[in-house]
Amino acid sequence: MDKLVIVSGALFFLADVFAVASLANPAWVISDDASNFKIGLTSQCLTIFGRDPVCLAPSLSPEWEATLVFIVLGILCLTVTCSLLALSLKKTSALKYARWAAFTAMILFCTAALIFPVGFYVDEIGGEPYKLPNTVKVGSSYVMFILAIFLTIISELFAGKICLPRL
């Protein structure tokens, strides 16, 4: 049981790190053409004629503001989960609350992943909801966020003893 809690806690912590890193990096949506921009949920960067990138705080659409709020709340839930899992090594009743906090984080992250593509219509991108134009693609930050979701789901399976490894 203790090994399973430690593995689950490590995976939750890793998911938390990936979620924070995805917010810190502005490469949620990047351009392939000469405009060379990167749009993130916390910053927007533009590189003009090979110069150093200029980064500004973005003006977010309501969909991306909601995405940011859901991700921040999910990060807080994962942090609480890691703390409760550490506490559960001494007091086993904390494990039940850790599972619920992790489940809440998973729901928040999945909701954010569903809402984010709705904001592809913004002027900087020029797409439609859930459809990017050919010159724009999702970047590494979005991939890190999806990886955080995946790790959260796998960790939740371990924490709930649904998928028992041979440890």
Image (cartoon, rainbow, N blue to C red):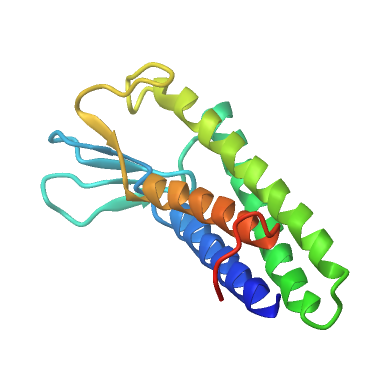
Determine whether 80 is above or below 114 in the image: below
Left or right: 117 in relation to 162: left
Determine whether 112 is above or below 4 in the image: above
Rendered residue at 77%/70% (across/down): 84
Residue 49: give x, y in percent of width and height: 11, 45
Left or right: 34 in relation to 164: left
Residue 126: give x, y in percent of width and height: 32, 20
Q: Residue furthest bottom?
A: 90
Quadrant where the image shows the N terminus: bottom right
Front residue of 21 and 46: 21
Rendered residue at 86%/78% (across/down): 91
Query: Residue 164 appears in which quarter of the rendering?
Result: bottom right
Number of residue marks: 0
Front residue of 157 and 38: 157
Rendered residue at 41%/23% (across/down): 122
Determine whether 59 is above or below 127 in the image: below
Residue 10: give x, y in percent of width and height: 57, 72
Front residue of 80 and 88: 88
Quadrant where the image shows the C terminus: bottom right
Residue 81: give x, y in percent of width and height: 71, 63
Q: Residue furthest top?
A: 128
Left or right: 20 in relation to 95: left
